[in-house]
Image (cartoon, rainbow, N blue to C red):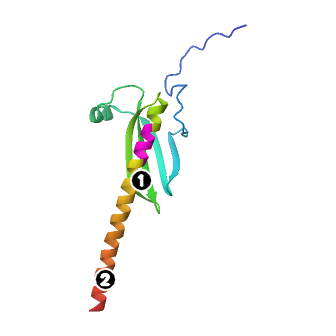
């Protein structure tokens, strides 16, 4: 005995799409990368994205990554991917994470240098 086919076909997300990581129903995930708190979100490409990035497929998404240090976002990254292609999703995640972590580390280094300069100036004024 066979069952009749369903009257609809799932298109997005594609049933076979498994990028090797899991997203919650809002398209978000949290990772820890090299000790950094990394927030990941995925959303379908908008018309503005298509114009800005010359993306065109209905299955295109953007993978966004933010790195927080002490509750402050110090690095961001993003990369387009094809939702139905697990390899593309993993590559986009990897690229966006790397971009965000590198940006975060540069920003924190910059902030530490600026803080050191402020402290040195304060000490010079106090010594006079």
Q: In which quarter of the image is the C terminus?
A: bottom left
Q: How many marks?
A: 2
Q: Position of residue 25 (x, y in %)?
A: 55, 38
Q: Which mark is residue 122?
A: 2
Does residue 126 show up magenta in the picture?
Answer: no
- Lateral position of residue 46 relative to residue 41, left or right: left
- Classify residue 96 by image quadrant: top left
The residue at the point 51 percent across, 58 percent down is 35
The residue at the point 46 percent across, 35 percent down is 89
- Classify residue 1 by image quadrant: top right
Q: What stretch is highlighted in magenta?
A: 91-97
Say which of marks 2 and 1 sits in front: 1
Type of secondary structure dominating the magenta stretch: helix
- Disc 1, SS: helix
Give how far apart the Cα atoms at labels 2 and 1 are. Answer: 31 Å
**Residue to which mark 1 is pinned:** 101
Does residue 94 show up magenta in the picture?
Answer: yes
Q: Residue 34 carries which label?
A: none
Task: State whether residue 98 is above or below residue 42.
Answer: below
- Disc 2, SS: helix
Residue at the far top in the pictured view: 1
- Classify residue 123 by image quadrant: bottom left
The earlier-in-sequence mark between 2 and 1 is 1
Residue at the far right in the pictured view: 1
**Near-viewer residue (47 or 125):** 125
Task: State whether residue 90 is above or below residue 124.
Answer: above
């Amino acid at each position: 005995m066979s069952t009749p086919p369903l009257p609809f076909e799932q298109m997005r997300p594609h049933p076979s799409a498994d990028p090797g990581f899991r997203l919650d129903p809002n398209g978000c995930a949290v990772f820890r990368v090299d000790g950094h708190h990394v927030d990941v979100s995925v959303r379908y490409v908008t018309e503005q994205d298509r114009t800005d990035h010359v993306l065109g497929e209905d299955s295109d998404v953007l993978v966004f990554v933010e790195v927080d240090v002490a509750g402050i976002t110090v690095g961001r990254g993003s990369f387009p991917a094809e939702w139905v292609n697990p390899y593309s999703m993993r590559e986009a995640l990897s690229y966006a994470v790397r971009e965000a972590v590198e940006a975060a580390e540069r920003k924190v280094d910059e902030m530490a240098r600026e803080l050191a300069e402020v402290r040195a100036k304060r000490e010079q004024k106090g010594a006079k």
